[in-house]
Amino acid sequence: EAFGEWMKYNSRSIYGCTMAEKEFVAPNGCRLTQSEDGKRLYIHILEYPFQTLYMPCLQDKIKFAQFLHDGSEVKYNPKNGFIMNRLDNAFLLPTIKPDTLVPVIEVFLK
């Protein structure tokens, strides 16, 4: 995939964005940007993990999340109750990396 094709789908994660607020911590292998109005967080996945991307800093802050390249929903499993589950506070990702240069998750914040 050419960089131009990647930018066609992911430009809103770059243009009109700034560094993410300090409360948002990027997982290893990821970079964050945030829309200037603060309503959307973008997770640029440089090193694609297997199945889960942990982001405890997003607990109770997500309205909806999707991949930018195809608009498919990305589920987030918040911590429920007192017993930690191995999927708590994690995005549940496809096991195979999407066919895009750098997958970007667009998170609509509450």
Image (cartoon, grey):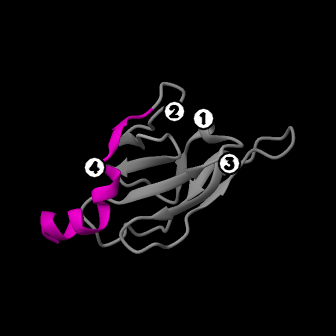
Q: Check disc 4 and report the residue beneath it.
A: 15
* Type of the residue with mark 1: Cys
Q: What is the spatial separation of the Cα atoms under label 1 and label 2, in whole angstroms?
A: 6 Å
Please say if 24 is above or below 96.
above
Q: Mark 3: which secondary structure?
A: loop
Mark 4, mark 1: which one is toward the viewer? Answer: 4
Do the residues under discs 4 and 2 have CB atoms within 8 angstroms?
A: no
Q: Earlier in the sequence, mark 2 or mark 3?
A: 2
Q: Position of residue 63 (x, y in %)?
A: 65, 55
Mark 3, mark 1: which one is toward the viewer? Answer: 1
Q: What is the spatial separation of the Cα atoms under label 4 and label 1, in whole angstroms?
A: 24 Å
Q: Earlier in the sequence, mark 4 or mark 2?
A: 4
Q: Check disc 3 and report the residue beneath it.
A: 86
Q: Mark 1: which secondary structure?
A: helix
Do the residues under discs 1 and 2 have CB atoms within 8 angstroms?
A: yes
* Type of the residue with mark 4: Tyr
Q: Mark 2: which secondary structure?
A: loop
Q: Earlier in the sequence, mark 3 or mark 4?
A: 4
**Which region of the structure is painted magenta?**
1-20
How would you rate the neighbour count of disc 1 (Cα within 10 Å): few for under 14, some for 14-19, many for 20 or more?
Answer: few
Mark 4, mark 2: which one is toward the viewer? Answer: 4
